[in-house]
């Protein structure tokens, strides 16, 4: 299961790199065409906006795995072990609720987005905003996994604090680069 999980995140990171590269090429190419040749590719503007949406949502998934989202841990750090477990459970249940709302909202909007096409490329907007499905399901599964691990008692006290210090992030990246 861990290999599948790692493969998913490697694929997500590769997809992010490809999307960001494509976005940079399209935007830079358009700038050169505009200022150098008084011309431009209209579809590249629209596609780069759509890629930005996907990059933002997929990046949020990868960042969640690394506990890289902003958080306030000053109160949680002062709690007892039991308090940390309760805070961890409550925060994850609330996040799971947000994932459910995102999925529900994307589902409710799907019919409208499927029948609406983008102005220039005429891509169905459900392809643009369908990333809400991927994000809500992926994050929801990660949260469920954390809650199951908490219920099994497989967490150290330090794991109950879901915010990493900048030093912890630097150490994790250094260790990842040496593997």
Image: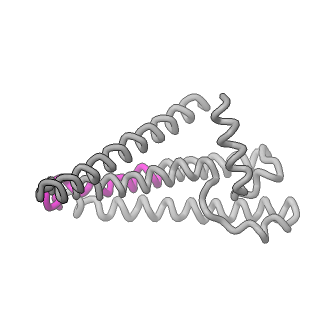
Q: Position of residue 101 (x, y in %)?
A: 46, 65
Q: Position of residue 124 (x, y in %)?
A: 19, 54
45 with respect to 69 (left or right) = left
Q: Give the camera-side residue of 124 and 102.
A: 124
Q: Position of residue 74 (x, y in %)?
A: 77, 69
Q: Residue at x 73, y 50 (%)?
A: 168
Q: Residue at x 19, y 59 (%)?
A: 35
156 with respect to 168 (left or right) = right
92 with respect to 31 (left or right) = right
The quarter of the image holding the N terminus is top right
Q: Residue furthest bottom?
A: 75
* Rendered position, 148 above or below 113: above
Q: Give the camera-side residue of 150 and 80.
A: 80
Q: Position of residue 129 (x, y in %)?
A: 32, 57
Q: Which residues are magenta?
A: 115-136
Q: Give the camera-side residue of 80 and 52.
A: 52
Query: Is there any visible trace of residue 115 in the rendered image?
Result: no
50 with respect to 76 (left or right) = left
């Amino acid at each position: 299961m861990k290999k599948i999980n790692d493969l998913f995140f490697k694929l997500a990171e590769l997809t992010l790199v490809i999307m960001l590269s494509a976005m940079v090429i399209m935007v830079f190419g358009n700038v050169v065409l505009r200022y150098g040749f008084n011309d431009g590719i209209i579809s590249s503007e629209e596609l780069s906006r759509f890629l930005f949406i996907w990059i933002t949502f997929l990046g949020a998934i990868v960042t969640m795995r690394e506990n890289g989202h902003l958080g306030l841990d000053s109160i949680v750090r002062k709690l007892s072990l039991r308090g940390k477990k309760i805070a961890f459970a409550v925060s994850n249940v609330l996040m799971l609720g947000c994932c459910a709302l995102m999925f529900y909202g994307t589902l409710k909007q799907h019919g409208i987005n499927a029948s609406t096409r983008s102005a220039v490329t005429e891509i169905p907007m459900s392809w643009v905003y369908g990333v809400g499905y991927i994000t809500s399901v992926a994050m929801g599964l990660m949260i469920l996994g954390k809650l199951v691990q908490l219920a099994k008692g497989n967490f150290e006290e330090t794991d109950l604090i879901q915010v990493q210090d900048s030093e912890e992030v630097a150490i994790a990246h250094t260790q990842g680069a040496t593997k």
